[in-house]
Amino acid sequence: MKTISVPAILILIMTLIAGCSTRKEEALRIALSSSSENYENWLKRADSLAIPVDFKNMPVDSAEKLLETCDALLLTGGEDVDPARYGKAADSSRCEINSQRDTLEYALIRKAMKLKMPILGVCRGEQILNVAMGGTLYVDLPTDKPSAVVHRCKDYKDCNHVVRIDTASNLYEITRAAGGIVNTNHHQAVNIVSSAFLPVAWSDDGIVEAIEYGNPKGNPYLQAVQWHPERMDAMNPLSSALIRSFVEAAQKYRKEKSEIKK
């Protein structure tokens, strides 16, 4: 039986350690404004090695510095955006507000845009992106825009409606779907769309269900949807294709960032 010398064993061990370190350094770091198991599992479907970085309750200055180490920003669902941020402070009593989160996510959006980092917004994520860029929201859909389309049910796991997608949009290029059935669990939605964005998907009652840059080709990756793709079937293109495109954009951003540092 052939034996391996002690120096050879040490070299082998150091090589393995170096290999593991390299792989760890190469793993994507995805910033989540407020993480959960659903979002992390959804992310792992597209990249099993991706590292989710949870920014929940983080001080703004620390968050801005940490975001510089990440490769993309995922703005997740949650509480209502404070109506005071879009000129409707008197309606705050109709909302469930987390002002600290609003402040944090405003800072993350500004920083990510400055870094030209890929951004994906989900539900609240779409709403706060629109507000941060000068748009407004419906404070409460059932009251402010009554409709036959139900956007929120007691059983959120079995609440769905149809959306149609603009076939000239980047969202269509990503999903190759002109429409489909999505889940829904929200009482607020985009009202006046920011001049920075275009609406690219709608429910049957005309509610905006997705926004993106008006000129996607001239800007970094940015997609935002009202539905919750992290809770949807893995085979649904309005879920799977969306997270894959986001991860691909993060990989491209990471590569470009690495080349600049060389």
Image: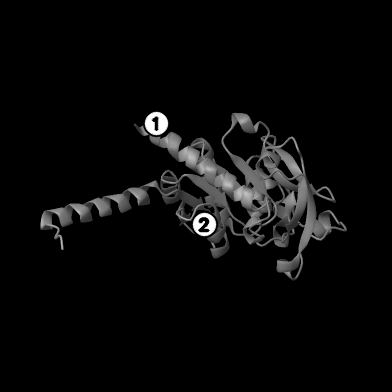
Q: Residue furthest bottom?
A: 155
| Residue in view at x 74 percent, y 67 percent | 158
Q: CA distance from mark 1 to mark 2?
A: 27 Å
The one of 31 and 130 positioned closer to us in this rendering: 31
Residue type at tag 1: Ile
The label nearer to you, 1 versus 2, is 2
Mark 1 vs 2: CB contact within 8 A: no
| Residue in view at x 63 percent, y 43 percent | 223
Query: Is residue 142 rendered to the left or right of residue 99?
Result: right
Q: Earlier in the sequence, mark 1 or mark 2?
A: 2
Q: Secondary structure at mark 2?
A: helix
Q: Position of residue 99 (x, y in %)?
A: 58, 56
Query: Is residue 209 rendered to the left or right of residue 109?
Result: right
The one of 164 and 194 positioned closer to us in this rendering: 164
Q: Residues within 10 Å of mark 2 (few under 14, many from 20)?
A: some
* Residue highlighted by disc 1: 260
Residue type at tag 2: Lys
Q: Residue furthest right?
A: 148
Q: Residues within 10 Å of mark 1 (few under 14, many from 20)?
A: few
Q: Quadrant of residue 217?
A: top right
Can residue 88 be seen by looking at this rendering?
yes
* Residue highlighted by disc 2: 44
Q: How is the image coloured?
A: one colour
Can residue 132 be seen by looking at this rendering?
no
Q: Which mark is residue 159?
A: none
Query: Is residue 22 rendered to the left or right of residue 199?
Result: left
Q: Position of residue 202 (x, y in %)?
A: 78, 47
Query: Is residue 190 rendered to the left or right of residue 124?
Result: right
| Residue in view at x 15 percent, y 63 percent | 1
